[in-house]
Amino acid sequence: MPKPVYALVGKDLFLQLDKLAQLVREFQGDVQRIDFDGETAELAGVLDELRTFTMFAGHKIVVVRNAETFITRYREQLERYIADVSGGGTLVLRCNSLPANQRIYKLIIKSGQVVDCNPPKDLVKWAAERAKQYHQIQLLLDAARLLCELIGDDLGRIDNELAKLALQNNNGKISADLVSTSVSFQREQEMWDMTNELAAGHADSAVRRWRQLVQLDPSTEYRAVTWLTMWLEKVRKALTMLQQGCSRGEIAKAARLFPPS
């Protein structure tokens, strides 16, 4: 049974978006999703959306990204709302951190749920469990190690690779040989090149790369939704840090952009 309030806490963008997608699926029927940026959102607007019933969907989810700023500005009012949630929509607060000793954290635990969205300490274990739970395949230990070595700690790219490997195997088991011969690492690099063209403002080149990707791999159009959403989140974060006077090196490290240029 979905809860009235969630806090998605952690620095991994993929885990936040993945959990948010799970929440949407948990509700029966159509769901209306409303998004706010915590740096600019007004409390009245967020609460109005939560308390107003949707006319065209069964339930409403109100998402506040960059929720740290929002919580700081409206801490007391949010605590009162969470302490006495009575029906309405579901509030989802997305934030990098939320100390467990804060009152609002304890109130969310009581009324809803705090979800850890920090990168896993054991990446190989995470990849193996993700393969089993979400892709119904067995990722052998040596294959999991190789996959993580080839991709690194980008959980979104690991998940994309697992989805592709699930279509390529015959017996439900993924070996290191299959991982090493998979061509999708090249496809992910091409996807990366496409978003780099977008970042540089080269729309024509980006569209040309997109057409090539779709021609080479029809599944691109499905995998690209998650990839582009994550890229747009990184762009927004980078622009915000740039406005705050952060150096390009700091921005590249925080947003996990490569190459930094």
Image: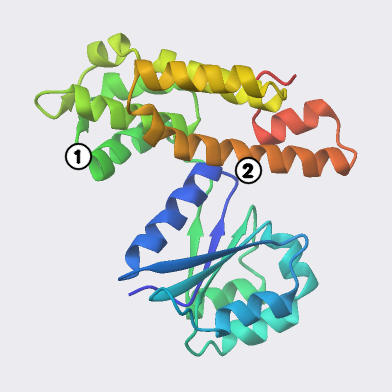
Colour approach in the figure: rainbow
**Residue 43 image offset from top left, x and y in percent:** 72, 76
Say above or below: 50 vs 154.
below
- Residue 149 located left or right of residue 108: left
Say above or below: 101 vs 207.
below
Residue highlighted by disc 1: 136
Tell me the SS state at disc 2: helix
- The C terminus appears in which quarter of the rendering? top right
Residue type highlighted by circle 2: Glu
Residue at 39%, 27% in the rendered image: 220
Q: Nearer the viewer, mark 1 or mark 2?
A: 2
- Residue 38 located left or right of residue 133: right
**Which is nearer the eye, 39 or 120?**
39
Residue at 72%, 21% in the rendered image: 260
- Residue 82 located left or right of residue 177: right
- The N terminus appears in which quarter of the rendering? bottom left
Q: Residue furthest right?
A: 245
Residue 253 occupies quadrant: top right
**Which is nearer the eye, 171 or 199?**
199
Residue type highlighted by circle 1: Gln
Q: Which mark is residue 233?
A: 2
